[in-house]
Amino acid sequence: MKTFRISADWLPLVLTVVGILSAPGVHAQGRTNIWEVPLGTLATELPPEFMITACGTNGGPPSTPLRGFHQFEQCTAESESGLHEVWFSFDDEYEYYLRATNAHRFVIEDNRANKLLGQLVIYSILLDAEGLVQGHRIASDTREDPEVRVDSDKLEAMRVFGYGAAGFECSDLPRLEGEMPFGGIYTKKLCEKVDGGRYITILTHRFLRAGQQAARPGAPLANEFEVGVWIEVINADLVGKGAPN
């Protein structure tokens, strides 16, 4: 019988994944995950559960509403990649039904439309001029309740859960003047790898900027802190990360 050993470097992330995946509401039934959409998929063939659409804002909230992914050209192409970012939401009808019927807040939380690994996130698809998928973005939503968002750096577990742990190279980003640990932890880290023709980057941060202050013990948590995860997956050839000719 073989014994498998986990590197000490990976242990905290593995334990986080185990805890998250054992929580209720993690696996939505019959729902396609954004990271399961192959590069080259036509905009008109994206999963029907990617229902509500609008132009994206570089992993931020939606802007111009769209009637579907087929209207992607209404979103300004990004200067660096030439791609059109389309924000989308999963069907939120049931979530709002629960709110309207005064369901228990825990039931509502477990059925939020765009919840991933216990956190509210923003999803967007990146499309080229021909309407072909060339990547996607996932970002922790800064509009989330700060009591929940304070742990949004745990979305880094997507390195294991969504994209496979192997192959990532991680580096700490420069610490700017005035930045301080938050909750006793300072993190500003970029992890990246090329896998299956996709260039995957995961940026994790947890700190206080200059001038931000942590809430006093026992006081309501202020929403002034830099905690979260930003994920981008893009066709490696578009960013010069593909195999050489």
Image (spheres, grey):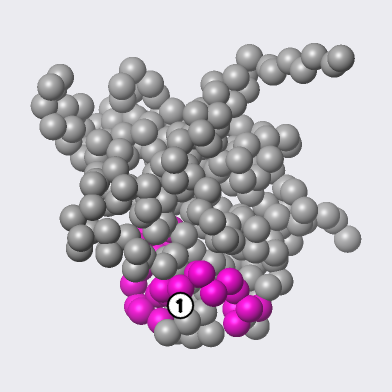
Where does the image place residue 84, in percent across and percent down from the top left?
52, 74
Say which quarter of the image contains residue 31.
Answer: bottom right
- For label 1, the crowd category at 10 Å Cα-Cα, with few meaning under 14, some 14 to 19 and many 20 or more, is some
Say which quarter of the image contains residue 167.
Answer: top right
Q: Which residue is mark 1?
A: 76
Give the residue drawn at x 62%, y 37%.
Answer: 160
Q: Is residue 69 above or below residue 18?
A: below
- Is residue 163 at all visible to an observer of this figure? yes
Q: Front-most of 119 and 112?
A: 112
Number of marks: 1
Horizontal arrangement in the rendering, residue 60 relative to residue 32 (left or right): left
Give the residue drawn at x 32%, y 40%.
Answer: 149
Where does the image place residue 107, in percent across and percent down from the top left?
31, 47
- Quadrant of the image for the N terminus? top right
Give the residue drawn at x 46%, y 36%.
Answer: 23
Where does the image place residue 154, in percent across and percent down from the top left?
45, 34
Per the image, label 1 sits on a secondary structure element best described as: loop
Going by the numbered disc 1, the residue's amino acid type is Thr
Magenta span includes 62: yes
- Is residue 34 at all visible to an observer of this figure? no
Q: Which region of the structure is painted magenta? A: 42-66
Q: Is residue 66 above or below residue 204?
A: below
- Quadrant of the image for the C terminus? bottom right
